[in-house]
Amino acid sequence: MTVWTGEAEPGHPYWWDDRSASPDPAIEPPAKADILIIGGGYTGLAAAIAAHDAGASVVVVDAGIPGQAASTRNGGMFGAHPRLGWEALAASFGAKTADALFAEANPAMRFVKDLITREGIDCDLQATGRISLAWTAAHLEGLKKLAGHVQAKSDVKVTIVERRDLTAEIATERYFGGLLFPEHCAINPRKFHSGLLAAVRSRGVAVCANTPVTQLRRDLSGFHAIVPNRTIRADKIILATNGYTPSLFRWHQRRVFPLPSFLIATEELPQQIIDQIAPGRRMMVETRARHSYWRVSPDSKRVLFGGRASMRNIPLALVAERLRTTMCDIWPTLNDTRLSHVWTGNTGFSFSHMPSVGENDGVHYAFGFSGSGTVMAPYLGTKVGLRAVGVAGGATAYADAALRTRWLHPFTRPHFLYAADLWYRNWVDRKEWRQRRDTH
């Protein structure tokens, strides 16, 4: 039996089947602007809206087609809460900042929901909730501890789902319980980006495709950015490139590195199969280091499944094999299911696993979303846009989540990921299987 339907070429994201979003037309950038934004994904577009509405003249340039990086390749999981426990955040940034990061989670999600409503963006926003599934009994205890901190330090709603109640959410015996975030949502990420792009264009802001910045000079008059056939002079620069940051920005590359994420989509499934395996229709993630995550497609016909098939780029046929094996281990019912899509995109990871907003050598930035960019990128893009203009509203605890590099990343390319991939696949994954077996 072939496992492929032939619907899409390898590398073509499922979301791109929707033809409603056309490529950006050829637009020449202006010679001068108050703010030049480098990167046309969620971060850059949200920054453009905020800076324009604060009175600045803005131009957005993208090295490729705006949005065709992570913004239209992700799983469409929409929610905000710190990826780390309170103790880990306090150890990295201090107790005060840890408290503030927890407290800012729900305001971030509410802000982006309001942005979607305000700009009239049709992005298949669905109030699904999201559940984090405990791979071991110890992981469930960790989720209970996290729930206590979330309840004490934020207004994010959370509920512990005990193992006996898990069948209402997912048909599998693999997990020991979960932590439910009932207010989290699902979106179609391409439609979300298309809506942001339309909002920026409606303001008369130039968004320029295939316009890489190849040189950047700074003098008393501001920045001079060299792009094909033109120099753009700008008072301020916002870097919004996350996992696609070019080598021109060495300081940033050493602090936020590209980590590939991989996804597959199944063929269309009978509704009774969808009802059986995912009765709760939640966004789902698991706590093991494999970081598998999955959801039902917006039309409720497919399963979209992602995770750590590798920590480096490998052939997509091997990606599909690994992810499909993991998916079918969770749901043996899908053993005969074929795949329609397999694709990849870069997440921008910081060493703290937290995003950051700041400024270095005159360049403002918001990135390092570490897998939480669907909400945090437009939210912090707005913050960095306001900070660059110098108006009220740019304050955020993420400005205190300083970016740091590590000794194992002395260059701009993350060569350490090759060793990390071997370590996780040959030690961490096997250890977690043993832990689960011993506590089953």
Image (tube, rainbow, N blue to C red):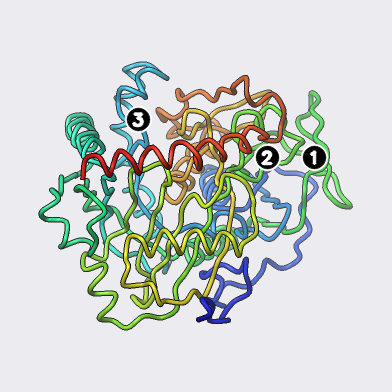
Label at residue 431: none
Label 1 SS = strand
- Residue 300 falls in image quadrant: bottom left
Which residue is painted at 53% across and 64% down in the image?
320
Q: Which amino acid does label 3 sit on?
A: Leu
> In terms of depth relative to the viewer, which is nearer, 438 or 366?
438
Label at residue 34: 2
Of callouts 2 and 1, the N-terminal one: 2
Label 1: few (<14), some or many (≥20) within 10 Å?
A: many
Which residue is labeled 1 in the image? Answer: 225
- Asked if labels 1 and 2 touch by Cβ distance under 8 angstroms, the answer is no
Which residue is painted at 42% across and 34% down in the image?
393
Counting from the top left corner in percent of width and height, residue 215 is at 83, 38
Which residue is labeled 3 in the image? Answer: 101
Report the quarter where the C terminus lies: top left
Label 2 SS = strand
Q: Say whether residue 232 is left or right of residue 238.
A: right
Q: Say whether residue 69 is left or right of residue 186.
A: right
Label 3 SS = helix
Between the C-alphas of marks 2 and 1, the distance is 13 Å
